[in-house]
Image: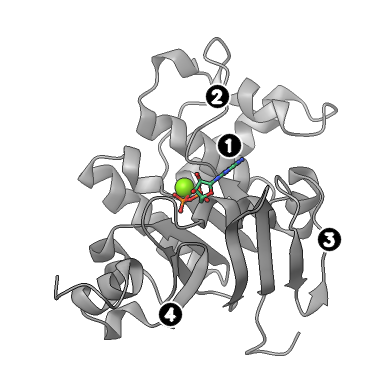
Amino acid sequence: GPAGNPLLSVRQLTKYFGSFAACSGIDLDIAPGEIHALLGENGAGKSTLVKMLFGILEPSEGAILWNGKPAVIRSPSEARSLGIGMVFQHFSLFEALTVAENIALSLDPKISLAKISDEAAMLSQAYGLPLDPKAHVADLSVGERQRIEIVRALLQNPKLIILDEPTSVLTPQEADRLFETLFKLKAEGRSVLYISHRLEEVRRICDSATVLRHGKVTGTCDPKQETPASLARMMVGADVSDV
Ligand code: ADP
Ligand code: MG
């Protein structure tokens, strides 16, 4: 669509588990080339929301719009073919296999391992994600494992990449490296949906933020214009004293 139109919009998105609403009437817009934070405490509904965007959970109510058009995302492969990539909080990697073999599992079986290795090596170089395609996952650190997931997502050339609490498993140095990767994705015009409960990093790297509490949106803002206290108030409620 024309410049300024959102890449992804969510309207009144709701997910019930039995009678419990983990997400309730969520509205969200993500522009092209923006790093958008999804901020909220544990249990706020962040993972549930992005699982609906990635076709893992079926919404109970509401709509997802992709480039302004209603989208029904029934599986991760449908999400990937739309242009949505995801880096999960908990990785699904086979320890006994190599990096390239793991990546191959999520791709068309007709693509050769040599070609996958070449492309993975090229992407890891281009995006500052050092990774040896021939390494066995069992020998890799958790930070390296996350890089596999990022490279795997990038191989599909996503327009939007979702990362669920990526820094929770990283050292501060690895987190800084990840932020450089995200800035490069942004510079290319890709969008990032960045889930976190860490106010400092959200204020540092994100252009906008949607704050969730008990499954509902409590605020949308430019986190750089907020104080840590004002963001914390959106996360935990207006009834608490200054943080
Ligand atoms: P967050 O990612 O913000 O920590 P979640 O989306 O994981 O929050 O969870 C939101 C709420 O929904 C929590 O209370 C959680 O226990 C509940 N929940 C998440 N997944 C399920 C499920 N599959 N069945 C029942 N309740 C769930
Ligand atoms: Mg979560």
**Which residue is drawn at the image coordinates 61% and 45% (left, top)?**
153
Residue 219 is tagged as: 4
Distance Cα–Cα, label 3 vs label 2: 31 Å
| Amino acid of disc 2 | Val
Q: Residue furthest front?
A: 19
SS of the residue at dot 3? loop
Residue 8 sits in quarter: bottom right
* CB contact under 8 Å: marks 1 and 2: yes
- Closer to the chain start, of discs 4 and 1, is 1
Distance Cα–Cα, label 1 vs label 3: 30 Å
| Amino acid of disc 1 | Ala
**Which residue is drawn at the image coordinates 35% and 25% (left, top)?**
141
Category of crowding for the residue at label 2, using alpha-carbon neighbours closer than 10 angstroms: few (below 14), some (14–19), many (at least 20): many
Find disc 3 in the rendering and name its residue: 72
Rendered view: 106 above or below 66: above
Comparing 202 with 227, the one in front is 227
- Closer to the chain start, of discs 3 and 2, is 3
Which callout, 4 or 2, points to the residue nearer the camera?
A: 4
